Amino acid sequence: MKLGELAQRLGCALRGDGDVDVRRVAGIAEAGAGDLTFVASARYAAQLQTTGASAVIVAPGLETPLPSLVSDNPYLTFARAVSVLHPDPPPAPGVHPSATVDPTAELGEGVHVGPQAVVGPGVRVGARTVLHPQVVLYRGVRVGADCLLHSGVQVRERCVLGDRVIVQNGAVIGADGFGFAKDQDGRYRKIPQVGIVVIEDDVEIGALTAIDRAALHETRIGRGAKLDNLVQVGHSVTIGADSVLAGQVGIAGSTKVGERVTLAGQVGVAGHLTIGDGVIATAQTGIPGSVDAGRLVSGYPAIDNRDWLKASAVFAKLPELRHRLRDIERRLDELARRR
């Protein structure tokens, strides 16, 4: 594709030769002839002198002799260029002979059902949705249009997925929540989990993630939220729009997570809490209590990130400080005995 044509498709200003051919996208260090790369930060600008790329996406203030596309958000433009230059055509519509589709299920126009997939009674699947091999949709499931469910995904009974939802391999949506009551003999009795999971539009769910159904009403993942691999969302949790949960995040039941929240890797959140809009929790933070909107928290128990950085700087010195404290106490005792 000519760089000028790509500029038009991406809505970018063009600098330099628009007749340059670009065939692929690549990182700035690995790029060669025919490659389009990008610079999202000025600290990488020096690599423009050595890159073998034919063209580059840059921010408005960054100058380069290379033919370039100018974007206020080079990283986002790069992501869009990947879609243009590396298209991934969907599989052909139709139902594979080894798939099982219940007669009461409804498949929209252009749906693809892969080998050994199972579509249960009363299921509705929207137009152009792709169900890869061994996807299982239990009875009464609703899946919107233009969704992509990768192999091994399980969606349990009556759960609802909106439009343009992507679910990566092996994720489980709507398994029973972890609910048990102890009887007079100290034995745990299962509490039936009769609620559902609702996944709103434009959500992506990572591989091997588990989102539990609610005990009574619903677990809800808000529009545009992104969940990484190995995330655990407990029953009756609500996650707000455009929130991001990185790998191995765990959220216990009935917690409400606001909009635009970021929980970094291995963050743990206790149950029945409220995490306000815009909260950021850094990696391995443990959150035992509610967090007000807009806070940046770290550590366990979660405290203000600046306080955590100060405290963590002291941790390595604690043995030395303990020794010095004991020495001071000893000297004070000696002074007291002399009086």
Image (cartoon, rainbow, N blue to C red):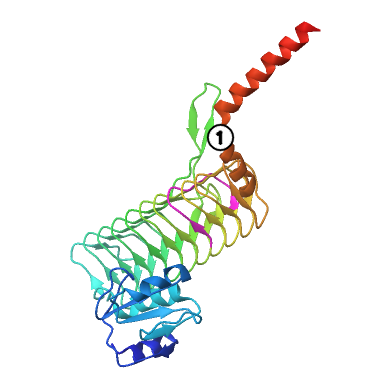
Q: Which residue is mark 1?
A: 315
**Secondary element at tag 1:** helix
Q: Closest to the observer: 57 or 51? A: 51
Check the image and report above or below for 56 versus 247: below
Check the image and report above or below for 331 versus 108: above
Q: Residue furthest left?
A: 97
Q: Closest to the observer: 123 or 33? A: 33
Q: Residue 63's quadrant in the figure?
A: bottom left
Q: Position of residue 211 (x, y in %)?
A: 45, 51
Q: Which residues are magenta?
A: 243-256
Q: Position of residue 322 (x, y in %)?
A: 60, 24
User: So how many labels did they put on this image?
Assistant: 1
Q: Residue 336's quadrant in the figure?
A: top right
Image quarter of the N terminus: bottom left
Q: Closest to the observer: 202 or 66? A: 66
* Amino acid type, label 1: Phe
Q: Position of residue 25 (x, y in %)?
A: 31, 75
Prevailing secondary structure class for the magenta stretch in the rendered image: loop
Q: Position of residue 40 (x, y in %)?
A: 45, 72
Q: Residue furthest right?
A: 339
Query: Is 29 in the magenta?
Result: no
The residue at 64%/50% (across/down) is: 274
Check the image and report above or below for 281 versus 40: above
Query: Is 248 in the magenta?
Result: yes
